[in-house]
Amino acid sequence: MRLVTYRSHVDAAGRLGALVDDLVIDLERFGSSVGVALPATMLDFIDLGPVAVTATAALLEQARAKWSIGTAVPLANVKLLAPIPRPRKNIFGIGLNYIDHVAESAAALDTSPDLPKQPVIFSKPPTSVCGPGDPILHDARITQQLDWEVELAAIIGTTAKRVTRADALAHVFGYTVLVDMSARDNRRAGQWIYSKGQDTYAPMGPCIVTADEIPDPQTLDLWLTVNGVQKQRSNTSHMLFKVDELIADISQGITLEPGDIIATGTPEGVGAGRTPQEWLVPGDTIDCGVEKIGSLRNPVVAA
């Protein structure tokens, strides 16, 4: 399934929907029409567990093209929000997880040129999240070095505590696209959270694709353009630490819970690594995407 959080008008609360062709099917209302209780939010749906994904997908397939009145809205008539507009916890960010990005970061940002022996983990607070089309805020009082990083993000579906790599992917609910915005001149004594955790610094969406539709997350193309000019293009096969390794590693010391988000790192091509260096300014537009999931477009605006 392709799941979204949407609103049908500007004052509406975000609601859980499933993308079917060019329609958004409101899952709570759809459930009511077929006599099944389904939640109105993404986090509540994730909490139902894997059985809910299988059962809901079957119900949607049975009802395809025979939607009850009030359950289906044209995608063009809604506003998509971040799939999880307000995560319960900080997003787990992974730094230096593509080999070529390690090299460009060492040259431009004084990080080590050696490949990490363990995942490099930082975090982005829930307030950093924004959705498709939302503005990325550029505060010139704080940064003159606003940079981009397109990433595949994994959404945890069931509690993972000290799991093995072999079992790790069974704990994934699905995948989405996330942009790890970074104010490169805001790193503080090697700490990254202020650089990467400011408001709007985690555009996310346009949907969550459930894990059954992406059995191997290490085969996906990902890309990013700025003002239509390609800056990043790679494939998740080039990750240094694969998605299952990341889940296994984090879960050894931090319990991963339903709805937790792991942003799995970015490939080469960031602004800091280019010659000359390139930084985002108000008026720029980022387009990015991950194969099998979809794409995001976000403008950069002055704060």
Image (cartoon, rainbow, N blue to C red):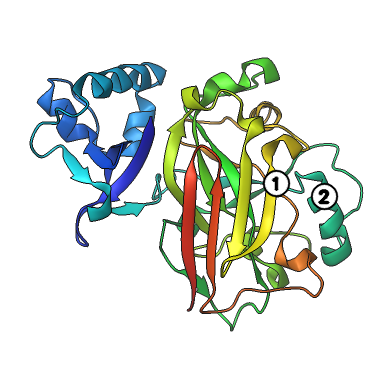
Residue 14: in sight, yes or no?
Answer: no
Residue situated furthest left in the rendering: 69
Residue 287 drawn at (x, y percent)? 53, 60
Q: Residue at x 45, y 34 (%)?
A: 209
**How much space separates mark 1 and mark 2, taking CA atoms?**
10 Å
Q: Is residue 259 left or right of residue 20?
A: right
Q: Is residue 16 above or below residue 224?
A: above
**Quarter holding the N terminus?**
top left
As shown in the figure, which amino acid type bears the numbered disc 2? Answer: Asp
Check if mark 1's residue and mark 2's residue have beta carbons within 8 Å. yes
How packed is label 1: few (under 14 Cα within 10 Å), some, or many (20 or more)?
some
* Rendered image: mark on residue 234: 1
Q: Which residue is mark 2?
A: 100
Residue 228 drawn at (x, y percent)? 57, 66
271 and 63: which is toward the camera: 63
Q: Residue at x 72, y 35 (%)?
A: 237
Residue 260 drawn at (x, y percent)? 51, 37
Q: Is residue 48 left or right of residue 114?
A: left
Q: Residue at x 37, y 27 (%)?
A: 47
Residue situated furthest right in the rendering: 114
Q: Is residue 300 above or below residue 86?
A: below
| SS for dot 1 | strand
67 and 246: which is toward the camera: 67
Question: Quadrant of the rendered structure where residue 61 is?
Answer: top left
Residue 198: in sight, yes or no?
Answer: yes
Question: Quadrant of the rendered structure where residue 164 is?
Answer: top right
As shown in the figure, which amino acid type bears the numbered disc 1? Answer: Ser
Residue 16 drawn at (x, y percent)? 28, 40
- Which sits earlier in the primary sequence, circle 1 or circle 2? 2
| SS for dot 2 | helix
